[in-house]
Each structure stands twice: as structure tokens, then as C-alpha cells.
């Protein structure tokens, strides 16, 4: 029976008969919202008779709402003669707290609501077994309507979450150094920054001082929101560690990573116990003197690549992360690299080389990445970034991006 047809007393009585044989708690109210009938399932779920319920919770469906926000939402929907769905908490006669989802449905006759039907579902069970309940809801038309309404609510909630994450992405990008700041330190550079999700676990960081510039590319544990939280932590710690005083006192790139590692372990309360989460980050960090004649490089898993005179030189990272590690090798190594004119330096996370290809079904890998750099290193540096992006999209084809990506290229 269509609810919109319930405008005669006989039809209301027929609906009452049907409603007394379903599992949902059902109440019927008149045009003013005053409740005048409940079914057997209502009495089983709530434990009160109609008169007891009215005495304890009130007589009117249209006034008894959990908060003002819900009341405004329901009022708006009913004004358009549309059903409204909301959740609320109730203590039944047995003293048990239960969560209910209510579908409040106006019965329309000639564009006027002549009655209201409230169909309540026990959300204590629904929240634990949504899929199973959705199947059960298909058994009757009223249950299907509840499933559809709930799906729409989930989509609204998903959009709200997406909007929040998008706003978080704006904040995260604001923490990254502006390209103008990088250009002041390195006029010839590119950045290829491709988060897998809206927010990223990869980040790049730069601080320019009077005597040196410190540059880092990092890959935090995870991606998406968890990785983004870790990236904010990493950026905050680097800002705290790397100051003008730090650089002037000739603190090395390796010492910066040692300090960063200690701060991450302390912040995450890592002890190295079995079963403990080993969150942290991989990173390549350079201290470049402002005459651009020398680089200090230290790395936690992330190497540095240099192209000089058409050959790739790889400076290997230490095989331990920023964070707790069972096979900890102690302090990081500090590499001193003398710079020559036209040297090209690349810092990167592993997202590019770990991408699975559409045809081969295999990862791109480090050697093909180096080989591709050799095919494009004579191009202008900005063009190299564009070509790397084109090559990445060619390789992955229709496959999804598997990880966050950041690559920085600098020409000296």
C-alpha cells in the first residue's frame, strides 16, 4: 500500500493491520502530529504502552526531536511533503539505551499532510550489520525505503568527509614551500607532486638561510589521511630542528636526520616491542651551501641521483627509516658531494618506481627510472618534470596510482 493513499479511515485501519505484522516499530499521528496508534513491535521494542510513552516522552511526533538541528532538518523536509530520516537515542522501559533510526513519512492528500507515520529501526543492530539489514529491508516495501534513505544519508556523509579532507589538502599544501621560495634558492628546478589521494603522505621541505639551503623529500608511512598526519609531524619537526643557528653551527645533513629520528620515536612513543606499529618516514635531505659548490646528503632509504656529463651517479641512502627499526644501524652517514656546473640532482620518493604498469603488471623499478632520466636530462629542467609525468601516465595506463609521488629536479 502506498502511504500517499492512506487518507480514509478504512485504509488507515488496513495499514494498522499490516503494520501489526512487521518487525519495525510504527507510530501513526494525526495531521497535528499527535500520536494515536502504535503497533505491537513498538510495544516490544520500547516496552511502554502508548499512554505510558506519551506521558514519559510527549504526545507529538513533530515536537520531540533530539536537537534543534534535527528539528530544523525534519521541518524543511516535511514542508516539501518529503519523508525525513534521523537518528536518536532512547532509554526503553527496561532501562536499556537503544539507538533508533526514524523514517518520518507524511501521508499526503491533495498536497496536504493528513497524517504522519513514524517507522523506527533499532540502529544498535543496524550499525553492526548494515549489509545484512539492507537485505532484510528488501522483504517489504517499507524496509526498502529505509535502505534507500540510509544510502542517501551515507552519500551525504561521504561528501561531507570528502569536503573536510579537501580542506585538509589545502592546509597541507600551504605547509609545503611555495615554488617562488624554491626558485629563490634554485632558479632551475621542477617539482612533480602527485598525491595518490586528496591528501598525501609524501612531502617536500625547504629552508633557505644566509649560508646554506636545506632541502628534503620525504615519504611517510601510509598515504591519504594517515600519511598526511605523519607529514605534518615531519614538517613540524624539521622546522624545529633546522634553524639559522643549526646551519651556522655546521650541523650536518646526517645530524639533522639523527635528530629527526629521535623526535619521531619520542613523539610516537616507539619502544621496539614486538607487534608495535613502526610508523615513520623515508627521507632524502640535502644541505647545499649557497655558493652551490657542495652538497651534504643523508638519506633514510631514499637515495640521491646525480647526472653529470651524461652519466648517472647514485648516492645510496642508509637502509633504515626515520623511526624505530629492529635492525637499526645507529647514526646516519653524511655524504659530501662536490658540485660542478650543469650537474643535475634528483630527490624522490618511491611512488614513481613502485607504480604497476598496465601492460606488464610489474613495477616501473629504479633502473628504468634512471634510464629514462638519461633520455631527458638535456631537456630544460621544467620540461623534464612534464616528460616524467607523461611517462608515468603512459606506464600505468588504466591502472590506479598505487602511492604518493614527489620528485624534485635541480640543475646547478
Image: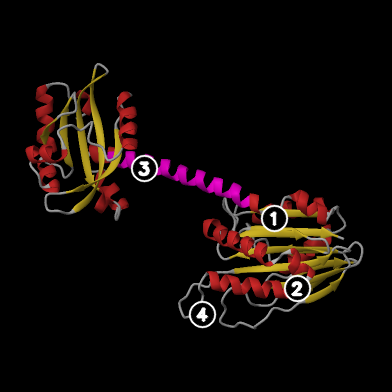
SS of the residue at dot 1? helix
* Percent of width and height locating residue 255: 71, 75
Q: Are marks 1 and 2 in contact (CB under 8 Å)?
A: no
Magenta stretch contains residue 269: no
Give how far apart the Cα atoms at labels 1 and 2 are.
37 Å
Please state the horizontal and vertical placement of residue 282, each as a whole percent of the image.
Answer: 64, 69
- Ranked by sequence position, the earlier of labels 1 and 4 is 4
Instruction: Specify the label residue 151 is tagged with.
Output: 3
Q: From mark 4 to mark 3, how far is it between C-alphas?
A: 43 Å
| Residue 358: image location, x then y, percent | 62, 57
Task: Tell whether 80 sits left or right of 256.
Answer: left
Q: Nearer the viewer, mark 2 or mark 4?
A: 2
- Residue extent of the magenta highlight: 146-173
Residue shown at 33% from the left, 38% from the top = 149
| Label drawn at residue 251 | 2
43 vs 291: above or below: above
Which residue is at the far front? Answer: 245
Q: Residues within 10 Å of mark 2 (few under 14, many from 20)?
A: few
Amino acid at each position: 500500500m502506498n502511504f500517499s493513499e492512506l487518507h480514509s479511515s478504512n485504509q488507515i485501519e488496513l495499514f494498522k493491520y499490516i503494520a501489526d505484522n512487521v518487525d519495525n516499530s510504527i507510530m501513526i499521528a494525526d495531521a497535528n502530529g499527535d500520536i494515536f496508534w502504535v503497533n505491537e513491535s513498538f510495544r516490544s521494542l520500547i516496552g511502554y504502552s502508548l499512554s505510558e510513552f506519551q506521558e514519559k516522552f510527549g504526545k507529538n511526533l513533530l515536537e520531540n526531536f533530539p536537537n534543534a538541528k534535527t528539528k530544523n532538518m525534519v521541518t524543511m523536509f516535511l514542508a516539501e511533503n518529503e519523508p525525513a530520516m534521523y537518528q536518536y537515542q532512547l532509554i526503553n522501559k527496561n532501562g536499556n539505551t537503544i539507538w533508533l533510526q526514524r523514517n518520518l513519512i507524511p501521508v499526503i492528500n491533495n498536497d496536504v499532510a493528513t497524517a504522519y507515520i513514524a517507522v523506527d529501526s533499532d540502529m544498535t543492530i543496524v550499525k553492526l550489520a548494515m549489509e545484512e539489514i539492507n537485505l532484510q529491508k528488501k522483504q517489504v516495501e517499507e524496509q526498502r525505503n529505509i535502505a534507500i534513505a540510509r544510502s542517501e544519508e551515507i552519500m551525504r556523509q561521504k561528501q561531507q568527509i570528502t569536503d573536510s579532507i579537501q580542506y585538509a589538502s589545502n592546509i597541507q599544501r600551504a605547509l609545503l614551500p611555495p615554488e617562488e621560495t624554491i626558485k629563490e634558492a634554485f632558479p632551475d628546478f621542477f617539482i612533480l607532486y602527485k598525491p595518490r589521494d586528496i591528501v598525501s603522505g609524501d612531502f617536500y621541505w625547504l629552508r633557505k638561510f644566509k649560508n646554506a639551503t636545506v632541502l628534503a623529500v620525504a615519504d611517510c608511512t601510509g598515504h591519504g589521511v594517515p600519511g598526511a598526519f605523519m607529514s605534518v609531524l615531519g614538517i613540524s619537526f624539521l622546522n624545529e630542528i633546522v634553524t639559522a643557528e643549526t646551519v651556522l653551527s655546521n650541523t650536518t645533513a646526517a645530524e639533522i636526520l639523527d635528530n629527526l629520528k629521535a623526535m619521531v620515536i619520542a613523539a610516537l612513543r616507539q619502544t621496539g616491542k614486538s607487534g608495535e606499529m613502526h610508523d615513520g618516514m623515508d627521507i632524502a635531505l640535502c644541505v647545499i651551501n649557497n655558493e652551490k659548490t657542495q652538497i651534504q646528503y643523508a638519506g633514510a632509504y631514499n637515495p640521491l641521483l646525480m647526472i653529470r656529463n651524461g652519466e648517472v651517479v647514485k648516492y645510496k641512502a642508509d637502509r633504515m627509516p626515520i623511526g624505530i627499526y629492529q635492525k637499526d644501524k645507529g647514526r646516519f652517514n653524511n655524504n659530501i658531494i662536490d658540485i660542478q656546473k650543469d650537474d643535475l640532482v634528483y630527490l624522490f620518493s618511491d611512488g614513481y618506481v613502485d607504480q604497476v604498469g598496465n601492460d606488464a603488471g610489474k613495477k616501473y623499478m629504479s633502473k628504468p627510472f634512471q634510464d629514462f632520466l638519461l633520455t631527458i636530462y638535456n631537456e630544460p629542467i621544467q620540461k623534464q618534470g612534464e616528460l616524467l609525468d607523461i611517462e608515468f601516465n603512459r606506464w600505468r595506463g588504466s591502472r590506479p596510482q598505487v602511492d604518493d609521488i614527489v620528485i624534485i629536479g635541480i640543475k646547478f
